[in-house]
Structures are given as structure tokens and as C-alpha cells.
Amino acid sequence: MKPIDEQHIAEPGLVLLDITGGDEVTVRAVMAVLEERWATSGIVPVRRDPGAPGVRARFYADVLRPGREGQ
């Protein structure tokens, strides 16, 4: 994955989450739950890194803004 860009975490409430899970369904489910709670980058592509266990996704969220559930 690309290095973390300061712009994505430059303000209070902005976070970058690297999610790792055993399978794509689990990682997508986690992103969907977080998307309900906070404003996020949405469901992002999930990828496998050769030689590493499981699958990964990089997900951005603003924990100060409500997600779909809070709208």
C-alpha cells in the first residue's frame, strides 16, 4: 500500500484504517458497518498481498461526521 498521506489525517477526526481479515466478505462487512457510523471513503477494493495472510483494505473515515445511519 502507498505511504500515508498527511492530507488524509491533517485535521482532528480524520483517520486512516488498514483493515486485514481472513476473507473479502469479512473485510467488506467491517467497512459497511463503519460506513453506517461515520463519513467514510466508502467500500474500497480489497486486495491480497503475495506472501501475506488474508486480505487487506485501506479505508478513510471522518469520525466527527455522521455516516449513512446518522443522516
Image (cartoon, rainbow, N blue to C red):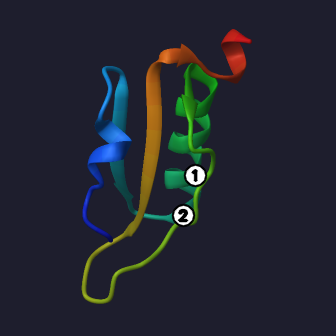
SS at circle 1: helix
Q: Which mark is residue 39?
A: none
Which image quadrant is residue 31 in? top right
Q: Residue at x 54, y 16 (%)?
A: 65
Left or right of 41? Residue 58 is: left
SS at circle 2: helix
Q: Residue at x 71, y 22 (%)?
A: 68
Residue identifier under label 1: 28
Left or right of 38? Residue 9 is: left
Q: Position of residue 22 (x, y in %)?
A: 40, 63
Which image quadrant is residue 49 in? bottom left
As drawn, 28 above or below 68? below
Tell me whether circle 1 and circle 2 mark residues in contact (CB < 8 Å). Answer: yes
Mark 1 Cα shell of 10 Å, populated few (<14), some (14-19), many (≥20) = some
As drawn, 18 above or below 22? above
Residue identifier under label 2: 24
Task: Give the distance between the C-alpha atoms of the residues marked 1 and 2, in whole angstroms.
Answer: 6 Å
Left or right of 15? Residue 51 is: left
Instruction: Look at the image and tell me in which quarter the N terminus lies.
Output: bottom left
Mark 2 Cα shell of 10 Å, populated few (<14), some (14-19), many (≥20) = some
